[in-house]
């Protein structure tokens, strides 16, 4: 009877903060959350997925979701550290309230330690950017534009900085094209901005987008600027259309951070820590980067068909 009582008392009640419903990347995160919830529920716990409604009022809305989780008196919180200057104080409030925190998707092991979180699970965005920049450089690109539709968010800024530093190793350069965050998910706005940029500078021979959705817009912008075959496209993350373009040699590569694993590992590791006191000596737990291109596209597509990519 005593053992049963202890298990019930320590069953993890976890909140996960994520992106909006029509963001394909965050729906992959949701798949990981849903699968992790089966494990948590089997031990008597629960998982609540708190999602942004829009990205128009980004930082304040994220802070509000964290405050909502605190008010729910959850035992654990999985949160991307997108905008540190806004989120850090309220994440510290959560930790001070006794909530166990794992940073997921955006952050670092150093930031987790600073905030009192137990770990960071995700990709190192700067390292991922460097890998993309090196790929461009190794394939002959010299002038790459990193299209940033979420300017000011720490993880995205790190991606573009990494692209610039990576291509610099082979003598190339990369500049950022910051667009209003309201343009994220607006394919027409992004495509028009990219088209205008390409028409203004005919030396641009590479585009990097921060999301798979923006890659779709970039492909349209390249076509409208009549630069097919002259501007090589790379993206962070991928979708079915991204992979189809890589398969058809219409896109050079995608940088994979395995979002399914990010949420699956974050939630299950946090629940085990709360329920059983377990911990990992590995900090951070990295899920990327990996380059998907013509050399491994078939294996990637097989993983997509199985629901794991």
Image (cartoon, rainbow, N blue to C red):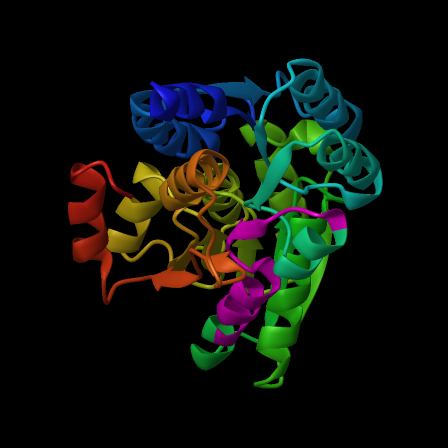
Task: Pinpoint residue 24: horizontal percent, then vertical percent.
Answer: 43, 30
Q: Residue 186, located in which quarter of the rendered image? A: top right
Residue farthest bottom in this picture: 170
Task: Pinpoint residue 11: horizontal percent, then vertical percent.
Answer: 44, 24
Q: Is residue 252 visible?
A: no
Q: Which stretch is magenta?
A: 115-134
Identity of the residue drawn at 57% across and 42% down: 102
Task: Pinpoint residue 225: horizontal percent, then vertical percent.
Answer: 55, 48
Above or below: residue 272 compared with residue 285:
above
Identity of the residue drawn at 35% across and 31% down: 36
Residue farthest front in this picture: 2
Identity of the residue drawn at 15% across and 47% down: 302
Q: Is residue 165 left or right of residue 185?
A: right
Above or below: residue 284 compared with residue 58:
below
Reply yes or no: does residue 274 show up in magenta.
Answer: no
Asked whether 299 or 212 is in front, the reply is 299
Q: Is residue 189 left or right of residue 115?
A: left
């Amino acid at each position: 009877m005593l053992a049963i009582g202890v298990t019930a008392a320590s069953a993890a009640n976890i909140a996960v903060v994520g992106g909006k419903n029509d963001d394909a990347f965050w729906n992959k995160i949701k798949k990981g959350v849903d699968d992790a919830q089966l494990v948590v529920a089997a031990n008597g716990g629960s998982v609540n997925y708190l999602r942004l409604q829009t990205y128009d009022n980004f930082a304040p809305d994220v802070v509000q979701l964290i405050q909502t989780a605190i008010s729910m008196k959850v035992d654990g919180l999985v949160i991307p550290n997108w905008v540190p200057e806004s989120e850090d104080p309220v994440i510290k409030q959560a930790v001070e309230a006794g909530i166990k925190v794992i940073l997921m998707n955006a952050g670092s092991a150093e930031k987790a330690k600073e905030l009192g979180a137990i770990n960071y699970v995700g990709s190192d965005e700067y390292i991922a950017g460097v890998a993309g920049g090196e790929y461009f450089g190794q394939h002959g690109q010299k002038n790459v534009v990193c299209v940033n539709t979420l300017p000011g968010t720490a993880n995205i800024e790190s991606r573009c900085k990494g692209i610039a530093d990576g291509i610099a190793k082979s003598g190339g350069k990369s500049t950022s094209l910051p667009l209003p965050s309201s343009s994220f998910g607006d394919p027409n706005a992004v495509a028009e901005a990219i088209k205008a940029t390409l028409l203004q500078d005919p030396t641009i021979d590479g585009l990097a987008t921060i999301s798979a959705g923006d890659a779709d817009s970039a492909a349209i912008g390249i076509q409208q600027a009549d630069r097919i075959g002259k501007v090589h496209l790379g993206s962070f993350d991928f979708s079915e259309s991204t992979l189809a373009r890589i398969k058809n040699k219409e896109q050079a590569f995608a940088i994979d951070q395995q979002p399914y694993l990010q949420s699956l590992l974050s939630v299950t590791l946090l629940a085990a820590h709360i329920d059983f006191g377990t911990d990992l000596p590995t900090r951070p737990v990295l899920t990327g980067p990996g380059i998907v291109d013509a050399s491994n596209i078939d294996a990637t597509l097989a993983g997509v068909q199985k629901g794991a990519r």
